[in-house]
Each structure stands twice: as C-alpha cells, then as structure tokens.
Amino acid sequence: MIYIRSSLYMLGMWIFTPIFTTLSLLTFPLPRRTRYILISGWARSMLWWLKVTCGLRYRVIGRENIPDHPSIILCKHQSAWETLALQQIFPPQVWVLKRELLWIPFFGWGLALTSPIAINRASGREALKQLVAKGKERLEQGFFVVIFPEGTRVAPGTRGKYHIGGAWLATHTKTTVVPVAHNAGEYWGKNSFLKRPGTITLSIGKPIETAGMKADELNQRVEEWIEQEMLLLDRK
C-alpha cells in the first residue's frame, strides 16, 4: 500500500507542477511578496496532497516563538518535506540555496520567481559577501530568510557540519534568529521515493537576538539547540 500511495503522490506532483509553474510565470510583473504568496500555493497544495495520498501530517511545537518581524530561520535539513512545510508555517520567506537549483526545468523557473538568494558555493568568501548583501535587501523588503546550516539533507540520527553562512548573515545584519528542528526524515527520507504515514513534529525554538554576538558563537548556540531538540524528538 505504501508504494501505491507514494506513487499517487508523485503522479499528482508530476502533473500539477508543470501546469502551476506555467501559470506562475504570469506573476512576473507583480510585487515580490505578491508573487511569493501566489507561488507558495504550490507548496500548500503539495502538503495537502501528501496528507491525502500518503497519510503524512504534521504538528508544530513553539509556534508562539515566531517573531512578528523579518528574521532568519536556521533549520535542520532531513527531507524534501520541510521545503514545503516552512512555507505554510512561517510568514513570507526567501531561501538561500545553490544557484544550480534554478536551472531545473519548471521547478527552478518557479523557484526563481520567489526571489531566492542563489549562491555559488564554490566562490568561498565572495559567497558570504553576496549572502550579506542580498540577505539584507530581502530582510528590508519584509521577508524571512530560510537557511539550512548543514547545507544538505542528513539522515535521522546524524548531523552535518553547521556552516557559518546563516550565523554570518545574522550577526552582520543584527537580525533575530529562529532555530528549527523536526523529524521529517523518519517519514520521508533523503532522496526516498517512499513516504511513510504518520505525524511529523516540527519544533520552533525561542528567538535569539544576535546584536553583539560573534558568528561562530551564534552558530554553535544554534547547533547545540537544534541537536539537543533532535534528541528529544527522536525519543517521542
């Protein structure tokens, strides 16, 4: 049954995504936030379809910790699920991502219209300068900024290296940071076709004010909270 359910989900995504992306291209003349609200309808639709076909739901702990002003979300990365769910849980947002994602037909074209911060990771320190410049601009435009500090998806029970980029942006713009942990990888693994039914738990930590903090200090604090919270989620 899990194979049939997962197949139905993928079939719906393959059919709906090209159609939605084509319609999304028509939003190009609209303001950035308006474009985002319309285009993020794809993510909300896919979450609904995931629940219908695969029986995969979610719950949120700490929703009250979401700031009422643009902030930087530093989130655990285990699955494709959080790339959908964060759009439904948090206010309008932009993503820091590798520029190659924008080259993917249909998906990348729609993604480009959401005003992401596309970085060339191979450019080293120049990438940090670009991140701060574009990140500051997006924050001033009223967007939250989403960053996966580990850079890539990691399997449940493991951790990747927490890169400095998110903390660097936060400390150089004096922006509030919101750490986020979740156990989505237990239900929808990295590059996995199968989606297990159940309820994902996403936990939002207390906001961290970054004024006066060093980037490495902030990065360590975020890592400690996320990984400690992951241990708690794994026991539930």
Image: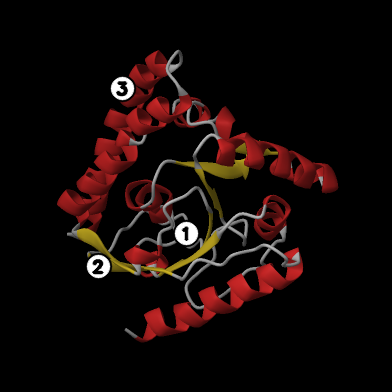
Q: Residue at x 46, y 54 (%)?
A: 191
4 to 112, vertically: above or below = below
Residue bearing mark 3: 19
Q: Earlier in the sequence, mark 3 or mark 1?
A: 3
Answer few, some or many: residues within 10 Å of disc 1's Cα (few below 14, many 20 plus, some between 14 and 19).
some
Decide if residue 187 is in sight here.
no
Q: Callout 1, which amino acid?
A: Lys
| In front of the other: 53 or 89 | 89
Disc 3 and disc 1 in contact, CB within 8 angstroms: no
37 to 121, vertically: above or below = above
Q: Which mark is residue 199?
A: 2
Q: Callout 2, which amino acid?
A: Thr
Decide if residue 218 is in sight here.
yes
Q: Which mark is residue 190?
A: 1
Q: Residue at x 68, y 52 (%)?
A: 169
At which x and y percent is residue 72? 55, 54
Q: Secondary structure at mark 2?
A: strand
